[in-house]
Image (cartoon, grey):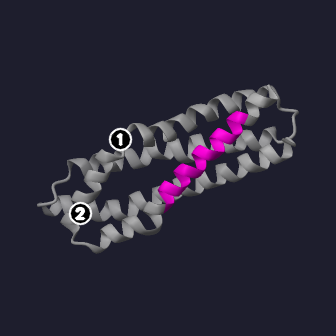
């Protein structure tokens, strides 16, 4: 059981770190760069990004980490008295709620609205202007949640003495 928890912790930490890095890039410079080009170009570029991101590699890491978090949380609850278990559970909650949940409830609806926006219309450009600030804010929440999950996984595995 301890080996399985250790392996799951390493995998969830790796997944959280990869996702935190991808989201960090968008919040720290990609969205800023898209906001500096003419609005119609930025809108079209982000529409393209939102299509291309739906791929096996990204979704495998993003969704796979959420699934591994669920397994790790269950095992950690079953071993609640083991050192570091609370940290592992906290990391799982941070990732599933703060990263996966925020994506589903906030970023995806904004992505869907952007997909329907027409860059050649005033209404479409208004969607883009709102998207730049609102989507980026929620993306920053996801970034912080994934990075915090990574830290809690590291603390949890250190406390387990592995």
Which image quadrant is residue 26 in? Answer: bottom left
> Closest to the observer: 7 or 45?
7
Residue that carries the numbered disc 1 in the rendered image:
54
Tell me if 56 is positioned left or right of 47 in this view.
right
> Closest to the observer: 98 or 79?
79
Does the rendering let one see residue 113?
yes
Which image quadrant is residue 86 in? Answer: top right
Crowding near the residue tagged with mark 2, few <14, some 14–19, many ≥20 C-alpha atoms within 10 Å: some
C-alpha gap between disc 1 and disc 2:
25 Å
In this rendering, is residue 160 above or below 77? below
Q: Quadrant of the C terminus?
A: top right
Q: What residue is drawn where x is 72% and y is 39%?
A: 89
Residue that carries the numbered disc 2 in the rendered image:
126
Q: Quadrant of the N terminus?
A: top right
What stretch of residues is rendered in magenta? 7-24
Q: Which residue is the extreme one toward the left?
A: 120
Q: What residue is drawn where x is 87% and y is 43%?
A: 161
- Name which of mark 1 and mark 2 comes first in the sequence: 1
Tell me if 76 is positioned left or right of 25 in this view.
right
In this rendering, is residue 11 above or below 131? above
Find numbered disc 1 in the image and state the secondary structure of the residue it sits on.
loop
Which image quadrant is residue 6 in? Answer: top right
Residue 133 disc label: none
Q: What residue is drawn where x is 81% and y is 30%?
A: 2
Tell me if 77 is positioned left or right of 36 in this view.
right
> Closest to the observer: 50 or 133?
50
Q: List x then y, in percent, for residue 159.
A: 85, 46
């Amino acid at each position: 059981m301890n080996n399985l928890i250790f392996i799951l912790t390493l995998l969830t930490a790796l997944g959280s770190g990869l996702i935190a890095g991808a989201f960090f890039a968008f919040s720290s410079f990609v969205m800023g760069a898209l906001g500096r080009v003419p609005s119609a170009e930025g809108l079209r570029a982000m529409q393209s990004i939102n299509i291309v991101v739906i791929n096996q590699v990204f979704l495998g890491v993003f969704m796979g980490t959420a699934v591994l978090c669920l397994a790790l949380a269950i095992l950690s609850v079953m071993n609640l008295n083991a050192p570091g278990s609370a940290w592992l559970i906290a990391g799982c909650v941070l990732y599933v709620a703060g990263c996966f949940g925020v994506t589903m409830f906030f970023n995806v609806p904004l992505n869907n609205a952007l997909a329907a926006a027409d860059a050649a219309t005033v209404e479409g450009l208004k969607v883009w202007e709102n998207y730049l600030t609102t989507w980026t804010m929620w993306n920053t929440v996801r970034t912080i949640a994934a990075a915090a999950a990574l830290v809690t996984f590291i603390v949890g595995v250190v406390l387990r003495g592995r």
